[in-house]
Amino acid sequence: MANLVDETKNIMKKYGIRANKDLGQNFLINSEVVENIVNSSEISKDDMVIEIGPGLGTLTKYLLEKAGKVLCIELDKKMIEILEDRFEEYSNFEIINDDVLKVDLNKIIKENKENEKIKNVKIVANLPYYITTPIIMKLLEEKLDIESITVMIQKEVADRLIEVPSGKNTGAITYTIYYYCDSEKIMEVPNSSFIPEPEVTSEVIKMKIRKEPVVKVENPKVMFMIIKSAFMQRRKTLLNALTNAQVFISKQEGIKILNKLGLNENVRAENLTIENYADLAKEISK
């Protein structure tokens, strides 16, 4: 760990870099964590890794040794200069200076699979805490041709994301991830693994994209619309939340549908399984 600490401090000093709080930057200095992220990603020379927010390139360095290609997406122009200096000699390194939420990832993946003879694409990232959910939702909702997503994020968020939905910690995104992915916790990461130390504990999780979604739904968009509507008013009963959101035409119609599905009229959003939501979507789509 000491070597990585010194290396990080030297790079920061050389380029006059300080962590940008607005971009949620915390630089990883724990080599054990880096190795765990890379190893759990199961990367080979047949793979292209898309690394989101590489920062100083601590993780990038390890990825370049394992992957056929590493494509980094970095918003901070100061980091672009550092990354280009550090890895210019690597023929399998490419970087894009842009906001990942604005990048056409489907186009990038398609072009690389056609031109670079890449078999698999894997996402690896130490995600900024403030933008974790939008990035993960983008990766899943755009139905990218990827094999897995291995990320380090805030522990509290990670625990909510990878649990089987139906419980008090469940959120709308929990159902999305469970629908698309088979997820697992890799390791907990202490605050001391970063410069500067964040105020929260981190966790590495891996989401492996399912070949088939966990439940069959004729129209997934309808199901996720229902889930989002339900969780926007999660303190209300499901009946009231979906009536207010005009998912149900009327309260009477909602009661009829819930009774048909064997659901209590006072049930709340987090108490439903994904199968329950799939059944709701089927009924509402009739």
Image (spheres, grey):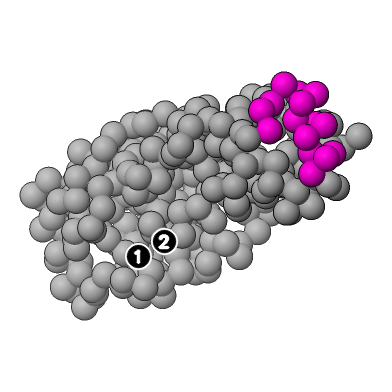
Extreme-top residue of the structure: 262
Q: Amino acid at mark 1?
A: Gly
Q: Residues within 10 Å of mark 2 (few under 14, many from 20)?
A: few
Residue depicted at x 41% and y 61%: 130
Amino acid type, callout 2:
Tyr
Is the Cβ of the residue at disc 1 closer than 8 Å to that at disc 2?
A: yes
In front of the other: 78 or 277? 277
Q: Position of residue 223 (x, y in %)?
A: 73, 39
Q: Furthest residue to the bottom? A: 16
Residue at point 59%, 47% (across, down): 236
Q: Residue furthest right?
A: 286
Q: Which residue is mark 2?
A: 130
| Residue under the point 77% across and 26% down | 259
Magenta segment, which residues? 251-265
Q: Quadrant of the C terminus?
A: top right
Residue 94 horizontal side relative to residue 211, left or right: left
Q: Quadrant of residue 198?
A: bottom left
Looking at the image, residue 99 sits to the left or right of residue 190; the answer is right
| Pointer 1 residue | 24
Q: Position of residue 194 (x, y in %)?
A: 20, 55
> Is residue 30 inside the magenta stretch?
no
Q: Rounded to the nearest whole Å, what is the CA distance between mark 1 and mark 2?
A: 7 Å
In the rendered image, is residue 144 in sight?
no
Residue 18 to residue 37: above or below: below
As helix, strand or loop, the secondary structure at mark 2 comes to helix
